[in-house]
Every structure is written in C-alpha cells, then in structure tokens.
Amino acid sequence: MKKNFILEIITEELPPRNIIIVIKSFYKNIVNELRKKFIKYNKIKWYTTSRRLSIEINRIKYEKKHILKYTKKIKNNNLEKKRKIFVKMQNDLKIIIFNSIKKLNLVKSMHWNDSKIKFIRPIRNVLCMLDDKKVDIKILNVKSKSYTLSHFFMKNNKKIYLNNANEYKKKIKKYGKVIIDAKERKKKILTEIKKKIKKIDINLSIKKKNIEEINNTVEWPKIYIGKFRSKFLKIYKKLIKYVVETIQKCLMIYSKFNNIKKYFIIISNISSKNPSRIILENQNVINERLRDIIFFLKLDNKKKLINNLKKLKKYIFHKKLGTFFEKTIRIKKVSCWISKKIKIKKKDVIKASLLSKCDLLTNMVFEFPEMQGYIGMKYAMKENEKKKIAYSIKEQYYPLFYNSKIPKYKISCAISIADKIDTITGLFIVGEKPNSKNDPFYIRKSTIGIIRILLEKKLIINIVKLIKKSIFSYSKYKTKMYIRKKIIKYFKKRMLSILKKHNFKKCFILSSIKTCKMIPIIIYKNTLEISNYKNIEILKNTYKRIKNITSKIKNLKNTKINKNIINNKIEKKLYSILKIFEKKTKNMIKDFNYKNIFYYINVICKITNLLFKKIFINDKNKKIRINRILILKKVNKQFNKIIIMKYFL
C-alpha cells in the first residue's frame, strides 16, 4: 500500500538567510524519523518560499517485515489490514512531524504561544494530507487542514482545497500564484533577468551568487529594472553594493570589466499592473541612501582618522572591561609582542593598532555599522598610510565566518589575533565565558579564528604565552592561575575539533597537543607525522609490555641507572642507543627530522623486544633487576617525548 504525503507549514515572513538551514534541518530530521518507524518511500523533497516550509513524500509505505509483524493477527481480511495500516501510518506520521520540529536546531527560535515547542516564526496554517485523507495534527496549537493558502498579496490568502496530496505543487501554482520550488523560481528569475538586461546592453551581467537570498524573499517573482543617478557611481563600490543589495534587496548590474553600472534589478514578489510605481519607489530609496553617503563622506573627510583615538575614551567596549580606548592600548601591547615573534616592524604595528578602532566614531560607520573596518581602510588609504596598515583596519575582523578568508598581511594577522585574544581573555576574567548554549560575544568563533590564522599563515606563536601576555595587559585585574588554565583548556578543545576535520585520529591530536607546547602549526605537523608512522602498533605493544613490568616496582624516583653493572650485550646496546637518542631528540624535534626520530624509535623497539626474549628482567640479583627496570623506564620516557602513549592504550 503506497501513499503520497504532503506537509506544508505557512508562517509569518521567514528570515531569508535562515530558510535553507531550517528546511534542510527539518528534512534531515524527517528522514531519520521515517527510518526509525520502518517507513520506506520512493522520493522525498523539500520546498520553501518566503512564508512556507513544505515536505513532500512520494510512494510512502512500511517495510514488508514490519507490515507482517503488525498484521499477523488479522487473517484473510485485506480491507481490515489496509485500514489498520493506514491508521497506524497516520499516527506514526504525527509522531515523526512532532519529533522533527522538536529537534530543529534553530538559532533565533522562541515561544509564540503556550505550546512547549519553540519555532522561528508564528504559524498561520498547516496542511497535512496522506493521499486523500487529512492527517490530524496540531503544531503550535494550529490544527492541520486539507487546504493551503494562496499568495498573500496577489490572491489575499484564498483557501485552496486539495482532493489528494499529489495535487499540491500544481494547484498552489495555478490557483495560488505561488511557485513552491526554489529551483523553479530561481530559473524563472534568471531567464527574465537575462531578457531585461539584453534590452539595455548585451555585455552586461549580474552576480548569480546574490540571487539565492533574494529568491527566498518571494513566492511569485517578477523582474523590473531601475537606475540610480550617474553621479553616485563615484562613491566606493562596496557602499553602493551595500545599499542596493543588502538594504534594498536588489541586484547590481556589471559591465564585462566588472564595473558597477547605474542600473539595478528589482525582484518583486508581485506582478503589478502599474510596474512604474514599484520601480520609482525603489529608485527613490536607493538615491536617498546614496545621497546620505556622500554627505557623511564629506563630513568625515574634514578630520583625520587618528583624531578619533582620544574620543574612544567615551565609548564603552564592555562595562567590566573598559572603553574602546583601553582596548586599543591592550591591542597595541599584545600586537607589539606578536610582532617580535613573526618578525614585522614594531613601528607599523603600533600605528595599525592605534588606528584599528578609530573608524567606529566616523559618521559613515555610525550610519552603516556593517561598514566598520572597510571605512577605516578607505580613510587610512586616503590619508596616505601604508597599504598594509590600511588593510589591517579591515582585516582585523577576519575571518568573519568559520570558513571565510583569513587576513592577508602579517600586520593584519597581528592586530586580528591581539583583538580576538583581548576579548577572549577579558570575558573569561569577568566570568562571562561561553557555554554550549550561550556565546553572545562569539568567543568560539574568535578562538577558532586565532587558531586558523596561526595554522594557515604558519606563524610560530605559543598560545600559552599569548594568553599570558594578554592577561598581563589587563593590569587592573588580579588574575588567578585557574583563569589561565581555563582559557588554555578552551583553546585545546577548539584545536582538537579543528584537527579532527583534517581526518586525524583523536589520540594522535591529543598526543601532539601535549608534546608541542600549544603551537598550532607545530601541533599540526607533529600530528601529520605521527599519523603516517607505520610501526605505531609495535611501539604501542612495546610500551605496554614495559609498563606492565615497571609498574610493579615503585619508589625508584631517586635511583639512577648504574652502567657499571650492565653485563649483557643487548642491554649495553640498548643503554647506548638510549643515550644517543636522548642527546639528539631536542634538535631532531626542533628541525622536524621525523625520519631520524622514527629510525631511532624503531631501533629501540627492536632491541627492547630482543631483550625480553633473551634476558630475564627479574634477575635474582636485586641490583641488576632494579637496573634493568630503570633502563626500561627510560625507554618509555623517551617514547613519551615524541608520542604520549597513554592516549593509544
């Protein structure tokens, strides 16, 4: 018995950036829950618009074994079997939907009524049908219906009844003026844009990557072309893009040389009889905002950027951590320390750190906060600052997201690391550290940002020393040792998660973190080397055998090996190679000479195992016995300098 199923949740306007994340999470939960209930299907699809989240499942049925188990008591009555299975499927689908919504990982969800479930927006209608029958379910106190609603503006939320679940996609398009499939909407948008652009100039184009978000703001897209005044083309390119694409949700048009043109694409959610009104409204808004920008640029250009430094004393960074001026001074101290480690000019770093927060007091950033960093860079370049210094004002905020680009220049890296570690340290000091549910200051992102910069730019900086330096810059706080340990522990956890994404095993990463003094690039290289070591099992078995023997004898801390009573050739050879290895280890690790390191480890393993075969460790003579135990202990000590073996047992 194969059925078709449709679930549509209509809400208030959804945030366009989060729609795809929400529907994919919902889809994944549904798939997992179907598997738990032994339900198979031919195809499952998700659909979204600016106000709808839909799941369509085709040819849904139970696994054969599950049906036999469930209907074994009913004999020779197919109708009764079918009815019972249908009722069970309806009940199971209710549980599946409920669990899938409950498990949604929504960042900005909240309670919209007395229901215990949180959701991203209030729900206005639920359509839930299995073939021609309505599935009775209640989501956030909204009861399911056998009808959907049409386009809010074009059809005034008219009810569209379905006779069967498989009518959904066609009926909502034909009678509701809603294209439910995001891919179909996007195709329609691109086709219409192409036609419109050709009418202006055949060589013009748009950036397709910007369409995704706008596509999520419409249900029935209609394309119009507007234009702003030519005189605004002299404004910084990024500011025009910000006004047109981010504020007004339109698309820029580019020439074949990637220059911005005065035309822009309006993607409207309605097909209007009077399109000139829509075009005019958009043009007016964009022209006004661009006029404001010119006004603010003129105001800001009357004074130098560095003049804002002292004014930062009036603006609080954090009520317990002081003003932006105090933060700037701390950034200067830490970035100067970093400059010595990565060998860049201290003078340039001081200049960059003092300018780093000055653009926060410009009129442009006050009006358009998202432009902080970029405006500082542009103003610094206009004041003939060095290119690297100017870029550091923008790049101090990099990486903006978990996988986005890191700073290009070393000065930018120094300012970015100093800024981030200052925030992390300060918040740990005042007890506002993040937890699994709450991270309002993006500490996790900043921590990952520092590690990524150090790894990808291959900068040799010890994170423990960096934390110490940052804590020291908070001179007014008497910071206890346990705060430092907590920050180090937090960094170690992030380091572990980053390296796991490189497909390294946990034991290798933990071992490297322990042996490499919290220098991310060294930890990475060490993990890579020991992951490629082929004789790890032999090493592990040797270590384990030694540990079993030596653990039985204690209180040998102050006892030293007596080389005069070593009377066996194998024992002498082992002692001799250990002495050589002990002397060379430090330099070999420093030079990353893992070829030699593993050569010595292999030889030591081989001789030790030979020793076990040929010699009785627990000799009758107590002095010889203890001496042999001490040699074996020394073997394990040398192993642990390279690989911490306890993580492999």
Image (tube, rainbow, N blue to C red):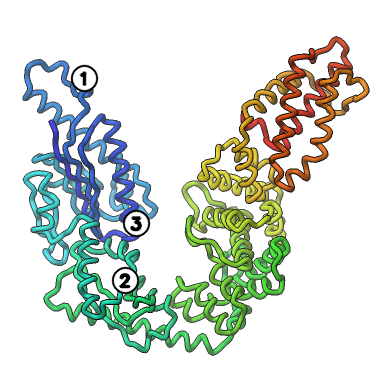
For residue 627, above or below residue 276: above
- In the figure, is residue 175 to the left or right of 263? left
For residue 583, above or below residue 362: above
- The image's mark for residue 252 is none
SS at mark 2?
loop
Amino acid under label 3? Asn
Residue 646 locus on image (x, y percent): 65, 30
Query: Circle 1 is placed at which residue position?
Result: 69
Residue 580 locus on image (x, y percent): 82, 35
Q: Quadrant of residue 331?
A: bottom right
Amino acid under label 1? Lys
Query: Circle 3 is placed at which residue position?
Result: 18
SS at mark 1?
helix
- In the figure, is residue 340 to the left or right of 133? right
User: What residue is shown at x 72% (from left), y 26% (from top)?
Assistant: 605
Mark earlier in primary sequence (1, 2)? 1
The N terminus: image quadrant: top left
